[in-house]
Image (cartoon, rainbow, N blue to C red):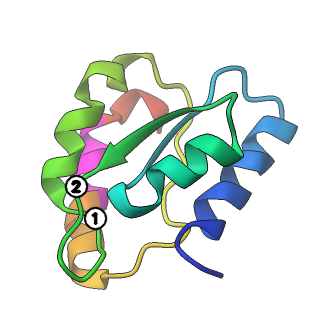
């Protein structure tokens, strides 16, 4: 499954499961394609590493919505293991209410 297909499948599943509002945080390279594929979702493009992994600085773009998030799905399509671990740790501390 490609990096754009994985978050699209997870987002579609969330909508089918009854998610009210859906926000997709995706790598810059695939964000616009996801926005076109799932127009009912808000898509936020996150900074990437040169290898295509999530850059931990991308968490800053999500800070304004962190407090209102009730559920969080992470992982589909993550490529760079080392950087992904740093990204996930930062996200978990930011989205503590969604745990």
Quadrant of the snapshot with the N terminus: bottom right
Marks 2 and 1 sit apart, C-alpha to C-alpha, by 6 Å
Residue 47: numbered disc: 2
From the top left corner, tell me how far across and down residue 46 is, in percent: 30, 50
Q: Which of 83 and 49 is in front in this view?
A: 49
Q: Is residue 97 above or below residue 85?
A: above
Q: Which residue is drawn at 49% across and 57% down?
A: 74
Residue toward you, 80 or 47: 47
Point out residue 22 in the picture as x, y percentages from the top left corner: 62, 30
Q: Name the residue under label 1.
A: 54
Is residue 5 part of the magenta span, yes or no?
no
Per the rendered image, the range of residues in magenta is 88-94
By secondary structure, the bulk of the magenta-drawn segment is best described as helix
Cβ–Cβ under 8 Å for marks 2 and 1: yes
Q: Which of marks 2 and 1 is in front?
A: 2
Question: Which one is earlier in the sequence, the residue at label 2 or at label 1?
Answer: 2
Which residue is found at the position 59% from the left and 79% from the top?
2
- Give the answer, above or below, for where 59 lies relative to 83: above
Which residue is rendered at x = 62% and y = 31% of the image?
41
Q: In this view, does 15 lie above or below 29?
A: above
User: Which of the pair 16/70 is nearer the observer?
Assistant: 16
């Amino acid at each position: 499954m490609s990096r754009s297909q994985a978050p699209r499948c997870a987002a579609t599943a969330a909508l089918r499961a009854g998610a009210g509002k859906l926000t997709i945080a995706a790598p810059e390279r695939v964000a616009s394609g996801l926005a076109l594929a799932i127009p009912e979702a808000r898509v936020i493009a996150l900074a990437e590493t040169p290898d295509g992994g999530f850059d931990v600085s991308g968490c800053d773009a999500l800070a304004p919505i962190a407090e209102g998030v009730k559920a969080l799905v992470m992982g589909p399509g993550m490529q760079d293991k080392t950087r992904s671990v740093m990204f996930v740790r930062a996200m978990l501390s930011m989205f503590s209410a969604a745990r």
